[in-house]
């Protein structure tokens, strides 16, 4: 079974295992490091099979919970059972799943797409109304700004909209395994 290398992925793993075992135990918040109990920020929890293929990924661009501990818990559960691209994760799959947690910085709007770099920055695209999508940084196989923009625009259903008619934001993330 996956062995977490950080407190972030330990929280994600425990959240998923508790869900699958139908338990509700949590780490007592008074035992949490301050970085988990006091900090608020968006985060994504990604599940990959040991062959590298995606198994689930859900997150928040901006925080919706009271701290990063609850943000990770919420997104880990969602990545395991609510990612519409996949069937709900089962306990039988846990030996073949690896977890990463991306802790995001506050997004900043950019006006020049050359300010992106797929190895450093994630990107958010929106039409300013109801369509929006996000793509994390440093995704294997995404090596150019053009690839990054093509993928994020398709995710948002905005592939036919000219870039000048969209808003773009960038952010960085710290990825924990």
Image: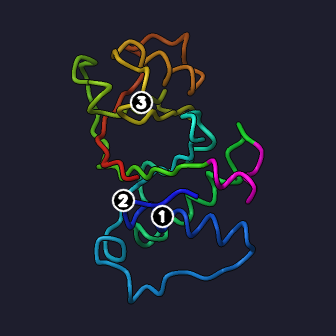
Image-quadrant location for residue 158: top right
Q: Which residue is labeled 2 in the image?
A: 41
- How many circles with numbers are drawn on the protein? 3
Q: Say whether disc 3 or disc 1 marks the residue closer to the N-terminus.
A: 1
Check disc 1 and report its element: helix, strand or loop: helix
Image-quadrant location for residue 24: bottom right
Q: Say whether disc 2 or disc 3 marks the residue closer to the N-terminus.
A: 2
* 2 and 3 marks in contact (CB < 8 Å): no
Quadrant containing the N terminus is: bottom right
Which residue corresponds to the image point at 31% horizontal and 69% vertical from the top-left? 39
Which residue corresponds to the image point at 29% horizontal and 49% vertical from the top-left? 105
Which contiguous range is marked in magenta?
87-96
Check disc 3 and report its element: helix, strand or loop: loop
Which residue corresponds to the image point at 49% horizontal and 27% vertical from the top-left? 127
Residue 169 lies, in percent from the top left, at 34, 33
Looking at the image, residue 23 lies above or below residue 77: below
Q: Which residue is labeled 1 in the image?
A: 71
Seen from the viewer's position, the closer of residues 126 and 115 is 115
Rate crowding at label 2 as few (under 14), some (14 to 19) or many (20 or more) other CA atoms within 10 Å. Answer: some
Q: Which residue is labeled 3 in the image?
A: 139
Q: CA distance from mark 1 to mark 2?
A: 8 Å
Rate crowding at label 3 as few (under 14), some (14 to 19) or many (20 or more) other CA atoms within 10 Å. Answer: few
Looking at the image, residue 50 lies above or below residue 150: below
Residue 55 lies, in percent from the top left, at 63, 41
Seen from the viewer's position, the closer of residues 121 and 143 is 143
Q: CA distance from mark 3 to mark 1?
A: 22 Å
* 3 and 1 marks in contact (CB < 8 Å): no
Looking at the image, residue 13 lies above or below residue 26: above
* 1 and 2 marks in contact (CB < 8 Å): yes
């Amino acid at each position: 079974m996956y062995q977490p290398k950080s407190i972030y992925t330990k929280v994600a793993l425990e959240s998923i295992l508790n869900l699958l075992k139908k338990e509700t135990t949590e780490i007592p918040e008074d035992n949490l490091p301050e970085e988990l109990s006091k900090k608020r920020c968006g985060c994504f929890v990604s599940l990959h099979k040991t062959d590298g293929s995606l198994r689930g990924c859900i997150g928040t661009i901006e925080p919706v919970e009271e701290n990063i501990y609850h943000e990770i818990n919420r997104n880990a559960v969602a990545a395991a059972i609510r990612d519409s691209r996949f069937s709900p994760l089962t306990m039988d799959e846990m030996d073949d799943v690896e977890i990463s947690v991306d802790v995001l910085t506050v997004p900043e709007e950019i006006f020049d797409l050359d300010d992106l770099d797929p190895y450093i920055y994630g990107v958010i695209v929106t039409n300013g109304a109801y369509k929006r999508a996000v793509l994390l940084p440093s995704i294997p196989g995404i090596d150019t700004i053009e690839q990054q923009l093509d993928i994020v625009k398709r995710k948002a259903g905005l592939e036919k909209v000219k870039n000048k008619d969209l808003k773009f934001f960038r952010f960085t993330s710290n990825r924990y395994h």
